[in-house]
Amino acid sequence: AAKQTGEPCRTWTAELDERAGEHARLGAELRAALDAGQFQVVYQPIVRMPEGRVTAVEALVRWQHPQRGMVSPAAFIPVAEQNGLIVELGAWILQTACRQMARWRAELGPTGPDRISVNVSARQLARAGFPATVAATLAATGLPAQCLTIEVTETAVFGGGQALTALHELRALGVRIALDDFGTGHSSLGLLQTVPVDVLKVDKSFVDNITEAGRHTVIARALIQVSEGLGLTAVAEGVETAEQAAALYDLGYRLLQGYYFGKPSADPDFQPRPAAAVPV
Ligand code: C2E
Ligand code: CA
Ligand code: CA
Ligand code: CA
C-alpha cells in the first residue's frame, strides 16, 4: 500500500518542484535577455486576395538565446505573463513594431503595408495604463493610430472589466481591435455582442482541413458570414497551401495569412507574390 500511495506522490511532488524551478529560472533569464537585447521582432505578411498585395503585417516576438538558439514565444510568453515581465517586454515589442511600421511608411509609401498588427497578452491589456502606453508609443514613433491593430485573444477580454475598458479607449484613439484565434474560445459569438472589435482572425484549426468537405468548412463559412453581417474584417490564419487559399477565397475570405504567403521574417519582402500564387 505504501508503494501505491507514497511513491507516486513523492515522484509527482519532485516533478512539480523541478518544473517550478525551471519556470523560475526561465523567468530570471527573460529579465536578463531583455537587458541583453536578445529579443527580436519579426513580421509576417497578411495578403489581400485576389491581387496578392501585402496590406498588413503581424509583429511576432523571437528570443535568440545564445546557447539554445531560437526559443518559441509559445514557451516564454506564458512565463513572462506570470512573472509580470510581459508588461515591459510588451511595451518594447510595441515600440519596436510601431517604429518599424513608421519607417516602412516613409520608405515604401502606398506600396508598403497599410497597418501593423501587434499581439497583446491578457495581463498587458488588464493594466490600467495600457491605452496610455499605446498613445505615447504612437506619438513617439509618429505612427498614425489608424495604422495599428491590437490583437487580443478571446480569453483576455472574456472577463470584461479593465480589459474591456481598455479596448474602448484604444478604439477611441483610432486603433483597431482584432480577436485572435477566433472560434477557439469559450464564448466566441457571445463576445461579439459586447466587445468592441474590428477584425476576426479565424483560427488555423478551421483552415487546416478546409479543402475536405466537412465540418471545418461549414464553420469557416459560418464565421465569414458572421463577420460580414457585423461589418467586420475577417482574416484567415495559418494558410499553408494554394488549395487552402483557393477554398478560403471561394468562401469569401479576402485577407489571408500563413506560410504559403510568407513566414515571419526580420526583413520582409513586400513585393506581391507572382500571379501563380493567386488562386482565382
Ligand atoms: P498567434 O498570435 O496566433 O500567431 C500566429 C502563430 O502562427 C505564429 O507563431 C506564426 O509564426 C504561426 N504561423 C503563421 N502562419 C503559419 C502557418 O501557415 N503554419 C503554421 N504552422 N504556423 C503559422 P509564433 O510566432 O511562434 O507565435 C506563437 C504565439 O505566441 C502567437 O500566436 C501569440 O499567441 C504568441 N506571441 C507571439 N509574439 C507575441 C508578442 O509579441 N506578444 C504576445 N503577447 N504574444 C506573442
Ligand atoms: Ca496573433
Ligand atoms: Ca492567431
Ligand atoms: Ca495561436
Image (cartoon, grey):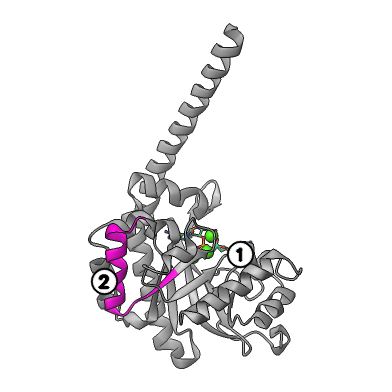
Mark 1, Cα crowd under 10 Å, few <14 / some 14-19 / many 20+, is: many
Residue at 32% x, 60% y is: 125
The image shows residue 160, relative to residue 199, as above or below, that is: above
Q: Does the residue labelled 1 lie within 8 Å of ligand 1?
A: yes
At label 2, counting other C-alpha atoms closer than 10 Å, the crowd grade (few under 14, some 14-19, many 20 or more) is some
Question: Is 123 covered by the magenta stretch?
Answer: no
In the image, which disc is placed on residue 25? none
Q: Hey, what amino acid is under mark 1? A: Lys
Residue 30 visible, this orientation: no
Residue 245 position, x and y percent, is: 68, 77
Q: Name the residue under label 1.
A: 204
Judged from this view, the residue extending furthest toward the bottom is 110
Front residue of 3/221: it is 221
Nearest the viewer among 16 and 2 is: 2
Residue 29: x and y in percent read 41, 44
Q: Name the mark on residue 169.
A: 2
Identity of the residue drawn at 53% across and 53% down: 72
Q: What is the span of residues highlighted in magenta in the rendered image?
A: 159-178
Q: Can residue 1 be seen in this view?
A: yes
Determine whether the residue tagged by mark 2 lies in a helix, strand or loop: helix
The location of residue 133, given as percent across then percent down, is 26, 66
Q: How far apart are marks 1 and 2 (CA)?
A: 29 Å
Q: Which amino acid does label 2 sit on?
A: Glu
Q: Quadrant of the C terminus?
A: bottom right
Residue 24 vertical placement versus 209 (above, below):
above
Sequence order check: which comes first, mark 1 or mark 2? 2
